[in-house]
Image (cartoon, rainbow, N blue to C red):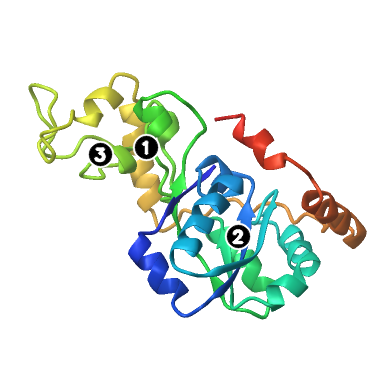
Amino acid sequence: MQKTEWKSAKEIEYILGDFQKISIISCGACANLCNTGGNAGIKILKGLLKKWGKEEVLAKVVIACCAEEIMRQALEKNRKAISRSDALVILSCASGVKSAFLNKPDVPIITILDSMGNEMISQQENPVATGICHSCGHCVIAYTGGICPLSECPAESKYGPCNKAPENGIRCTIVPEQSCMWKEIEKTADLATLEELSHIHKSEDEKRLSSPIIKASPLFLKKLVGWMANNSIGFDKFIRSLK
């Protein structure tokens, strides 16, 4: 899922500025699982609005904010309420904010969340589960035991240990308070493949495969899916049961 985190209260208060009447559209998928979207996110934002003397005009959870058709129908269905607002807050990752801009709600669009990268849904506390993908464009985690070296190594050494890696012991030489993550990665890493990948990724001749062009779905089908997404009840609670 796409991990999102709240901006600071100071930044949120500044962003909302003189806007008094606020509408909220909240993502029931990824942001919901991060406690920044869904009804949980709405509850937190409502508390801030009340604290700052602002009025909530609309608070709507949709299944996924990133889908343009779902967002379009959400905006259309709630257009009257949104038109009475000074601003529309999107509780979603950047994809949901982009989706809102594409559909032109005719009021300022505000985001109070930061997109942090990709993480998995798990209760385990280990680098494979807790590490966040920073979307570097050349993923190597299949050869590092599922651990993202850019996320977990302070030196962001991607294809092997950095030149300061400890020869003896396990402490990181850059951040002594933590263990050298490459000591853990090396237990299962394919170092030979990583070295070869470093050359391939740096090659100017490298070209990505092209994905096949998929014919767009019929408009009526898109509208049907959008309608179903905007009329689902309790979906965000169902999704949160995965946590």
Residue 230 image offset from top left, x and y in percent: 78, 53
Camera-side residue: 31 or 219? 31
Residue type for callout 3: Cys
For residue 69, what is the image quadrant? bottom right
Q: Are marks 1 and 3 in contact (CB under 8 Å)?
A: no
Residue 45 image offset from top left, x and y in percent: 51, 57
Residue type for callout 1: Cys
Please tell me how crowded label 3 is: few (under 14), some (14-19), or many (20+) other residues with Cα within 10 Å: many
Q: Which residue: 72% across, 52% down?
A: 212
Q: Quadrant of the N terminus?
A: top right
Residue 174 image offset from top left, x and y in percent: 12, 41
Q: According to the image, label 1 marks what residue?
A: 148
Q: Label 1's element? A: loop
Of badges 2 and 3, nearer the viewer stands 2
Q: Label 3's element? A: loop
Residue 96: mark in rendering:
2
Residue 200 as seen in the image, left or right of residue 95: left
Residue 36 as seen in the image, left or right of residue 98: left
Residue 218 as seen in the image, left or right of residue 208: right
Q: According to the image, label 3 marks what residue?
A: 153
CA gap between label 1 and label 2 equals 25 Å
Q: Which residue: 48% across, 69% down?
A: 53
